[in-house]
Amino acid sequence: MTDPKTLRTWALVTGCAALVGVACQKVPYTNRKQFNLVPNSIMLGLGKSSYASMLAEVPVQKKGSNNQTLQSVGNRISGVAKRPDYAWEYSLINQDEINAWCLPGGYIGFYTGILPVLDNEAGMAFVMGHEVAHATANHGSERMSQQLTLLGGLTGLELILANETKMKPAQRAAVLGALGVGGQLGVLLPFSRTHESEADVIGMMYMARAGYPPKESQRVWDRMSEHAPNSVPAFLSTHPTNEKRKGVLQEWLPNARKKYQRNKLPHDTLNTLWGG
């Protein structure tokens, strides 16, 4: 007769497996199957509260031509993303950091330090599209789901090792510790790189649909290599190399060009605004 502890252990494992099946979704454009456990309502609340906290600690430019361009580009890109349930707010942070970010719900921050890398309106449109894509593809909730699953999986394995083997606590801890490192390098970081490449693709599609030349997406990564060379080994980085990003974008470029030709803006979006 099966031990009750064993039944509880395998019931937990089976239940987790069933939950994984229910939580699968698809990402826009790439159609990648996505694992997502966290309800959208929770993520929207987290995004809103985190946005307020982050902006409270930094200087924000609320006037001027740079902020006007950010608002204009943001509205164009979010308009083609078709998520009216998102807040879509854009803040220009007056700091030299070469960075931009997006929180769940469409709360986006650009640092003035990234403007020379963007160079022009189309460059900003690509990075804006990239950040908007993180929101529409639910990358934040997927990343959180991965972390929750990893923790739950290790907990289930601990139960199995404790009930079905003669391992001592120290031995079980050593096994779980090794698997935890393996999970971090083998699951969480590669998925994060997938998110970045995916956001590049979706962002390029968004910029093209909004009327910006998609080829500028690759030039942004050329300028990024000049301004902020990546010295972190690719397999330990949460971001792909700039060359790998450009290669992925090249594969999708023909499709993006078709969208651009149908929606091309009448003014020069490649005119340098922030050379440096």
Image (cartoon, rainbow, N blue to C red):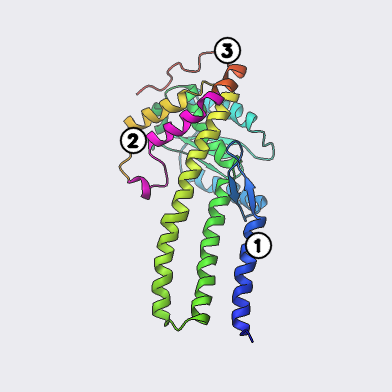
Q: The disc labelled 1 sits on which kind of residue?
A: Ala
Q: Residue at label 2? A: 228
Q: Which quadrant is the C terminus positioned in?
A: top left
Q: Is residue 151 toward the left or the right of residue 31 in the image?
A: left
Magenta span covers which residues?
A: 233-256
Q: Earlier in the sequence, mark 1 or mark 2?
A: 1
Q: Which residue is mark 1?
A: 18
The percent coordinates of residue 84 (x first, y second) are 69, 36
**Percent coordinates x, y for residue 134 in the rendering:** 55, 41
Residue 68, numbered label? none
N-terminal of the two: label 2 or label 3?
2
Kindly tell me whether residue 81 is visible in this rendering. yes
Q: Position of residue 31 (x, y in %)?
A: 60, 40
User: Label 2 is placed on what type of residue?
Assistant: Ala
As drawn, 43 above or below 271: below
Mark toward the viewer: 1 or 2: 1
Number of marks in picture: 3
